[in-house]
Amino acid sequence: MDFQVVVLAGGFSKTLVPLVSKEVPKALLPVANRPVLSYVLELLEQNNLKDLIVVVESESAALLIGGWISSAYVDRLHVEVAAVPEEIGTAGALRAIDHHLTASDILVVSGDLVCDVPPGVVAATHRRHDAVVTAMLCSNPVSGSTESGSSGVKDKAKKRYNIIGLDPTKQFLLHVAAGVEVEKDVRVQKSILRAVGQMDIRADLMDAHMYAFKRSVLQEVLNQKEAFQSLRRDVLPYLVRSQLRSELLLNGVQSEENGNDKDASQNPKIVLSQLLANASTPSFHELQHALGPNGFSLSPRKTHKCCVYIASNSNYCVRLNTIQAFSDINRDVIGDASHLSGYSFSAQNNIIDPSAVLGSKTTVGPQCMLGEGSQMGDKCSVKKSVIGRHCRIGSNVKIVNSIVMNHVTIGDGCSIQGSVVCSNVQLLERVVLKDCQVGAGFVVIAGSEHKGESLAKKEK
């Protein structure tokens, strides 16, 4: 598969504060005690894609990520880590490494993607249709975490979704609107509806941020559209909108995008699906003969197609782009999606490192993980939680639906529910946390209770 592979690993994501810090960029956030980036790298490795460019925002994040990759994947992968400026977006990141892109097709994958869909199926779809872009779509996460970048939003009216328009065969992308509020009207070009005849509008699909691009087209768009920052919000919608311009030119009639939309009843009825049915034949690209009555003819210009690969509902496919998603993915990878973890589970359906020490009457339930060198006192209870390496946990501690990272100290009588506790945190005795995030190195004073709070040191 002669695709050049680019992994967009991000940097110090503001939407994931306080989980990220100067020492832990987004790509190194732990999922089941492994950096989230390892899930993409191993997915690519399993598919024999071992020559990669990993793009990281900021020099300092690139040093941290590059150092981890070189130690974890020595002799396994050939990885070039490219540092780009912060906050230039996914399109900006590709623009910044333009000179590295040389293959005819580019596979672009987000470094925060945790999934079990082989990249080869996206590449094969792309090649089969000779598409300019093929995007992988998957079902929205069950928790309802959308792509708004915020977590814990109770007001459903504020949730934003992708609105996707597909042809009847569900192979071609005809309309895409990112981050739309479902309550608002969805505007679709008349020219598309007129051309396609019918369109399947979906709001239940998520852009998984795995794309195959024709390099020449991608570079042309990035060079011509310097304001484009996002692949999902700018580049993909632009390519989808421009499909019809390159495929259908009615004699003497411009589309409404050019400000001269004529009454649809004056135009011969053309069903784009008839053309798409012939998508695998060369004639689709250079259709020059008349179709139907009224002297309708197609432009001899080269056409382009935007395709989709829709992952099965049985596949796991979630992006770690919110704090809620971080918690959900950790829960899933030691639960229903345990095949992604890379670990062997015990007869009790949990993972307790042999070096971990449990006190008397302490229970670690199913779908839990306890990392190497961690110690727990007496009468503790752990349910559906991940505990990292070298933690010191006192007696009578309850941990439920939570993630505790490495080198955390938890005093006697603490209760932690639905929370994320970052590395090197100290919880003194009898602390109660519910739905909280505690940033790295923070000290929570004895006897304090916190609900729905973000506790972190001020960044210097």
Image: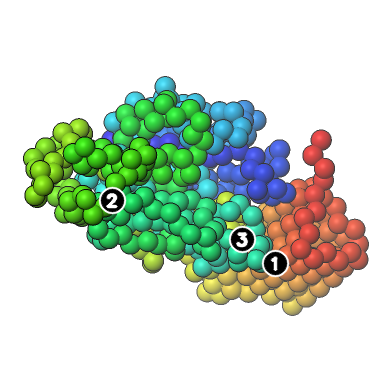
Q: Is residue 79 or residue 460 the one in the foreground? A: 460
**In whole angstroms, how far apart are the C-alphas of marks 2 and 3?**
36 Å
- The mark nearer the N terminus, 2 or 3, is 3
Q: Is residue 336 or residue 302 the one in the foreground? A: 302
- The mark nearer the N terminus, 1 or 2, is 2
Q: Is residue 172 or residue 51 the one in the foreground? A: 172
On screen, 407 above or below 351? Answer: above
Q: Position of residue 307 (x, y in %)?
A: 30, 48
Name the element at disc 1: loop
Residue at the image position 26 percent from the left and 52 percent from the top: 264
Name the element at disc 2: loop
Q: Is residue 160 left or right of residue 121?
A: right
Task: Tell me if residue 178 can be seen.
Answer: yes
Is the Cβ of the residue at disc 1 closer than 8 Å to that at disc 2?
no
Q: Quadrant of residue 249?
A: top left
Quadrant, the N terminus = top left
Residue at the image position 37 percent from the left and 61 percent from the top: 201
Q: Is residue 261 left or right of residue 231?
A: left
**In whole angstroms, how far apart are the C-alphas of marks 1 and 2?**
56 Å
Residue that numbered label 2 is attached to = 263
- The mark nearer the N terminus, 3 or 1, is 3
Residue that numbered label 3 is attached to = 158
Q: Which mark is residue 418?
A: 1
